[in-house]
Amino acid sequence: MTAKIKINEEMKGSMGLLISILARYPEVGTVTYDPLERMIQFSFLLHQDAEEKKMKVSAAVIEEALLLFHKLTKTNPQLLNVKVEKQNPISSLYINRDVDSLTFHEIALLVELLKQQVGSFCLSEKDNSNIIEDDEQLWQEEMITHLLDNLPGNEPSQSLYAYREEGRVMVFNK
């Protein structure tokens, strides 16, 4: 028995965006896209050793830096929210952003800020034997930029959820 999935062009754009983000940034644990709210949520998984107080300070620093980034680039995000949730045995750092003002440069800045603030506590599916070459990273960055710039306004009503498991990216309707 074969299952056929009908994917329209709008779904390809949003699915492609989630896949590209996860492929480019192994630090990103999951990405969720809500087309009705035009919102994307990044989640980063943190070791259980991470102190809750330090994580909350780090979340505040990341949010403040992103707000400064928007001030310097003269953009006005409709949604920018950073929060930490302590869950046993791990914690999660969530960043909610509207897709209309989100850029590749902000995603890259976000990941770098995360590395600086909680680098050693961030769970990542990096595989040192399979290092991504510069050309492929550049291609992925261009793909993310293209998909963000061309994400249609008439998205399907299904929210999408993407995560990485054993080197593969999985995307599901939420």
Image (cartoon, helix red, strand yellow):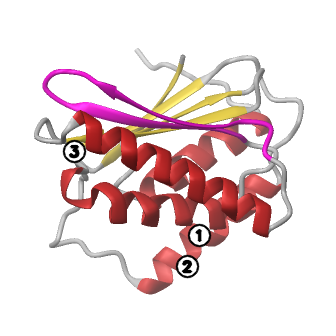
**How far from the left and from the top, in percent, is residue 86?**
27, 25
Report which quarter residue 59 is drawn in. top left
Q: Secondary structure at mark 3?
A: loop
Q: Are marks 3 and 1 in contact (CB under 8 Å)?
A: no
Q: Position of residue 137 (x, y in %)?
A: 48, 75
Other-residue count near label 2 (Cα within 10 Å), few / some / many at <14 / 14–19 / ≥20: few
| Mark 2 to mark 1 CA distance (whole Å) | 5 Å
In the image, the segment drawn in magenta is: 77-98
N-term mark: 3 or 1: 1
Q: Main secondary structure of the magenta part?
A: strand
Q: Quadrant of residue 159?
A: top right
Judge whether 135 appears above or below 58 on screen.
below
Which residue was labeled with disc 1? 141
* Image quadrant where one finds the C terminus: top right
Q: Identify the residue at image location x=61%, y=47%.
A: 16
Q: Which mark is residue 166?
A: 3
Q: Residues within 10 Å of mark 3 (few under 14, many from 20)?
A: few
Q: Is residue 99 visible?
A: yes
Binning the other alpha carbons within 10 Å of mark 1 as few (below 14), some (14 to 19) or many (20 upward) gives some
Q: Position of residue 161 (x, y in %)?
A: 50, 28
Give the answer, above or below, for where 161 lies relative to 54.
above
The residue wearing badge 2 is 138
Q: Magenta span has 123?
A: no
- Does residue 139 appear left or right of residue 29 in this picture? right
The residue that appears at 22% across and 48% down in the rendered structure is 123
The alpha-carbon separation of the residues under discs 3 and 1 comes to 22 Å
